[in-house]
Image (cartoon, coloured by chain):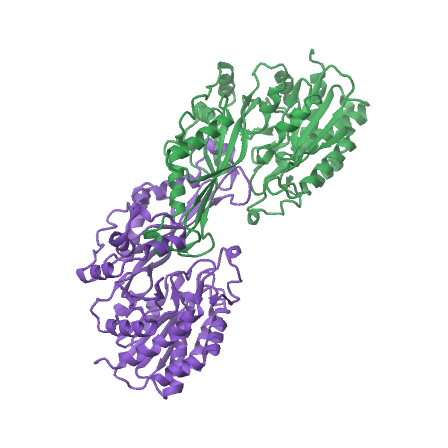
Chain colours: A green, B purple
Amino acid sequence: MQRALDYANARRPAELEDLVRLCRQPSVSATGHGVPETAALVAEMMKEAGLATRILERAGAHPVVLGSWDGHRSRTVVFYNHYDVQPPEPLDEWQSEPFAPEVREGKLYARGVSDNKGDLVARLEAIKAYLAAEGGLPVNVKFIVEGEEEIGSVHLHQYVQDSEDFLKGDIVVWEGGERDARGALEMQLGCKGLVYIELVVRGAVTDLHSSLAAIVPNPAWRLHQVLACLKDPATDRVLVEGFYDRVRAPSPAEEELLVRFPIDEDTYRRELGLNSFIGNLTGLELSKKLLYQPTCNIAGLVSGYTGPGSKTVLPKEARAKLDFRLVPDQDADDILRRVRLHIARCGFSDVEVLVHGVENPSQTPVDHPAVPVMVETARTTYGAEPVVQPRFAGTGPMALFTRIGLPSINGPGVGYYASRAHAPNENIRVQDYYLGIEHVIRFLDAYAQTRA
Amino acid sequence: MQRALDYANARRPAELEDLVRLCRQPSVSATGHGVPETAALVAEMMKEAGLATRILERAGAHPVVLGSWDGHRSRTVVFYNHYDVQPPEPLDEWQSEPFAPEVREGKLYARGVSDNKGDLVARLEAIKAYLAAEGGLPVNVKFIVEGEEEIGSVHLHQYVQDSEDFLKGDIVVWEGGERDARGALEMQLGCKGLVYIELVVRGAVTDLHSSLAAIVPNPAWRLHQVLACLKDPATDRVLVEGFYDRVRAPSPAEEELLVRFPIDEDTYRRELGLNSFIGNLTGLELSKKLLYQPTCNIAGLVSGYTGPGSKTVLPKEARAKLDFRLVPDQDADDILRRVRLHIARCGFSDVEVLVHGVENPSQTPVDHPAVPVMVETARTTYGAEPVVQPRFAGTGPMALFTRIGLPSINGPGVGYYASRAHAPNENIRVQDYYLGIEHVIRFLDAYAQTRA
């Protein structure tokens, strides 16, 4: 293994160039911008790393890239990643172009560099180094890299179904962890689910002079009523009937992790420019709220005139994009059904509900044997005790893998607490990228030594 | 007077060309686009009509164009118009370019053609014809044409103050009436006031990944709470303390007009694509709501991601543009003060309140001597009994003229019930434009014969 580490360290400039190459390629799943080109590039980069590759396609779906190395080892590690990124808007808040990667003060700025092109390329670089230096890997390796993660992994369940034989293995290593303010790697053993909807409220056939507001219903006010029926912002409580029925409290082992690894509240608040969190929560209660409570978030609102100055218009339409983050054992389809039913029961059956994404939550047991391996190799790599979180607050399609017998663990990754995923000026620290490559090498080596 | 009418009718193609010329010139007061060029063009067209003209300017304000013809007559008519227009957005809903006037099926489409470039040019054409055919006008005439009507006539009070001597006269004829579905001209004797504000709610320093929604306050939800504190959409009732204190019910003479000239509900609903009006109101109650009740309208809403598909973002900011239409005897400054106070009392003193416009309501007595003259000449011109409305539901700076002793009456105009002012595909019927010119000629002639 030491040869692989030395080989990787000697190649750092080339490793950075590979990452820049992938980040330069736009791959916005929401709009489709650059998606097929990126899939082809990922397959090419996998081949360069020494993997056998295949691009899977389905009508109306973004392609999935598979990669594998089979040395008939006793352990098989599956890596899950995605090559798509969030839309880069608002563009005017970027200090450099989102798809023109730029290094400033030791940080690499680009849309997707943290979420999660950096993670993906770090893994490929680790494998490339290991193969070149040692002539083979200590475990069998498989990659499944999708292009729809940022739009709710719409077709991944079909791709996973199609590839069930290919995907046989011991564990799926998730897209990538981040380093906290103390420099420790944060690992997660599960994730939240998601229901992403868009509400469309319509009024008159056209925008009108707002003098008619005294007698013509305003869809923006009606949207406001629909929102009021969905959540009470004062208590941050979702009002959909049965919404909380299947919310599971942390197990004793999970709660122990929450106590052992509290949220770094001060750093968080300072970075976000906030005086306090919702409900003035702190400590364990804050952790529980973040990881064990579902949400109803307004991700977008638009109606009428949004330009500079004033326009006295009565809008013909109002729209809200809402994402609900779900926790075990909530079921995404069930929640979507309840939300629709609730909206109708509140008297808004005229409101159109568009569905942009549906994903289930997932939880890997805290005592899974891959956990201590990941902890130990992270400790060695970063020189700091890693933070093990029972789950993360975000969403990924882990549940699809749980269903085919693959527990998930989120470990090696290249982001950090201020990576600004989904936001302008997304970035990673270049040094973290190199450490991420080392961590993958160490993990593969150590995991090979566990008993099958 | 017959010579003037004949002269005008013989010039119809040239009259239409003059209107197209003004509509081709953008003049969006909200953005400033084309504003000084339009003021210069209006002055030029006034000169061509035979008026002495002057362009007034003030620092930071759009210019005002004055025009006059003085024949030492016993009566002086002041015309108020504006050369600015509403922003043309949403552009993709226009069937022809908003500033490339186009005649289709007898209608002229252009931003501002109805509100109110058509009215202004019709008046100038009437004067041009009268002067050319008769050698002089039967009354003294003055024009004050501003460029900020669509943004709340921000500086007009200063211009009016500066021009108080110039503006001496008997009556100010307002920007222009419209024909209803039966073909009758609608005249108004007053208008509503306006307070136009924009609420800005801020959250974290940047847009965030929406997984943080469980613990980080969302400004869009907070905006929703501010809106809930301002109005109850279920009852359409503004909740600001004291908001309704000075709302005056219609006088017996005003209510008589409401009864005599009911709203053409069916046409309205059909044109707007509505099943019913707010509160299922009909008849006299509908008229009273439209003309005698103030409003709180959402003119614009924006937060987070508003593009296609989904983006799981927690927005850093949320904005709402609100216009309150006020009725006599509400005072705009007083209402603005109350709204600010109410927002603070509801616990939202962190919310920024930008002010985009403040105007007072106005009411001319129903028994003013100009009323029967306007009625009679409208009846002759259109062959239908005109509709006299005590006020209109929209806003204009009438109150500034009331204050210097000039009562307002809204009469000759070229729009109709489906002119779509402030909306895409704004248009007038070309025939109405020619009739509007005739009406002005008849009004000037008849008003000259009233006793001074």
Residue B345 falls left or right of residue A161: left
Q: Is residue B446 visible?
A: yes
Above or below — where is B161 with respect to A208?
below
Please state the horizontal and vertical placement of residue B267, each as a whole percent of the image: 36, 56
Please state the horizontal and vertical placement of residue B122, each as a whole percent of the image: 40, 74
How many numbered marks, from 0 up? 0
Q: Residue furthest top?
A: A451
- Identify which residue, B32 or B381, lies in the foreground: B381
- Identify which residue, B23 or B372, lies in the foreground: B372
Please state the horizontal and vertical placement of residue B97, each as a whole percent of the image: 53, 62
Residue A306 falls left or right of residue A42: left
Residue A328 falls left or right of residue B339: right
- Identify which residue, A247 or A388, lies in the foreground: A247
Q: Residue furthest left?
A: B252
Above or below — where is B32 with respect to A203?
below
Above or below — where is B322 with respect to A54?
below
Above or below — where is B9 with respect to B189?
below
Quadrant assignment, res B42: bottom left
Quadrant assignment, res B264: bottom left
Q: Is residue A230 visible?
A: no
Please state the horizontal and vertical placement of residue B129, each as a whole percent of the image: 40, 82
Q: Quadrant of the C terminus of chain B?
A: bottom left
Q: Quadrant of the N terminus of chain B?
A: bottom left
Residue ID at (70%, 29%): A123
Residue A175 falls left or right of residue A345: right
